[in-house]
Amino acid sequence: MTACKLLRAALLAVLLALPATVGAQQPGFYVSFSGESSKSSQPITNVYALSASGKTLSTTVLDTSQTYQELRGMVFGPDGKLYVCQAQKSHSAILQFSATTSSGGYTRSFLGQYATPQSSSGLVHPYQPAFGSDGNLYVTSQDTNVATAFLGPASSQPGQAMPNSPFLQKSYPSGTFNPGTFVPAHSAGKGGVPNVTYVPTSQGGLTFITSGSSTHSVRGLAFDNAGHLFVADEGKNRIGVYDATSGAFLGAITQSSNQSINDPVALYFNAANSTLYLGSPGNQRLFTYDVTNVAKGNFKANVLIHDSKLDKLSGITLDAGGNIYTCSRKNNKIYKWSPKGDSSSDFAGPFSDNPEQIIAVANVGG
């Protein structure tokens, strides 16, 4: 064999030995979809990986050995693993996936159900997960209309319900609540919801209302870096603000100087500018709120964007450059907005199903 052939053979051997992830384009975002056959002839029941420019890199972020039912919010845990809400009522669960990927660098292995209604009867139709600074997992559930706290992955009993919030233990020592209730309900209306003690809205209880065929209940939640928890109380058209340790109600964000929040769903906190981004699809607006104002007792928001593209707004995220990404359930697209919200472009889609949530995976846009 000539020296040239020997060199080619050696190079081929090296290439064959490389892992499949080498050379794969790294995803910038993950997107979940409605997955409801009643709303789409082609429901999407997995999570998509998108590049930093909006190109679909993979349609199977989640292990294909499992079947998924109506995926919603997603979050990376302090352990680097991915946690996903499975919302379909009879399959309600928080699903856990590996911190590393396989299959060309995109698919995450299914590790199991992290939390279920057996962990807490409050977990019914879960919508949004978020980890607090304490390392524990907090989840909103639409049908029970509460936010529930579960022990984090570093605990000796990960996924088990925590004690009810210190506020509830102190203020309602004889009250009946779903295990792990951190933010309670003022009202809940779905069939099969356990009987609980309802808490007044003046103490942060969440409102459940029915309008025609639609129901309005708790949706997004987000922690800031100053000890506060924000919860989208869609039925009350407000964002409840709570002490992230005690669960005590501190106040509510309801409007800017001249515009009210309407049907709030998505929340996103950006630590870089201490700003909470609030989706208000009921009036096609995106509000912002400076979280340093909580300490001043000022709960007035600002309107950043007013645009028809925000009709049926669902998920919100930002990239490292401050660009804003919003999901639209109206036309199944994702839009990209400048940091000041004064310009926008189509980023991804249209998809065959409603995009629900979007999270940034890599440090894109910087």
Image: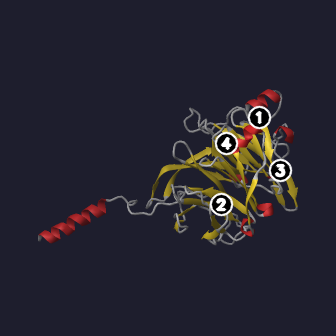
Mark 2 or mark 4, which is nearer to you? 2
Closer to the chain start, of discs 3 and 4, is 4
In the image, taking residue 348 as reference, residue 181 lies left or right, namely: right
Which numbered disc flags the more N-terminal residue, 4 or 1? Answer: 4
The residue that label 3 is drawn on is 191
- Count of picture labels: 4
Q: Residue at x 15, y 71 (%)?
A: 4
Query: Which three-letter amino acid code belongs to the residue tagged 2?
Result: Lys
Neighbours of disc 1 within 10 Å: few (<14), some (14-19), many (20+): many
Q: Is residue 5 visible?
A: yes
**In percent of the image, x 87 and y 56: which residue is there?**
210
Q: Position of residue 81 (x, y in %)?
A: 53, 47
Q: Residue at x 18, y 67 (%)?
A: 7
Q: Residues within 10 Å of mark 2 (few under 14, many from 20)?
A: few
Q: Which amino acid is tagged 3?
A: Gly
Q: Which residue is mark 1?
A: 248
Q: Secondary structure at mark 2?
A: loop
The alpha-carbon separation of the residues under discs 2 and 3 comes to 43 Å
Which amino acid, mark 1?
A: Ala
> Could you tell me which quadrant the N terminus lies in?
bottom left
Q: Amino acid at mark 4?
A: Tyr
As helix, strand or loop, the secondary structure at mark 3 comes to: loop
Q: Which residue is mark 2?
A: 340
Please tell me the numbered disc located at residue 343.
none
Residue beneath the point at 48% across and 59% down: 106
Q: Are marks 1 and 2 in contact (CB under 8 Å)?
A: no
SS at circle 4? strand
Q: Quadrant of residue 341?
A: bottom right
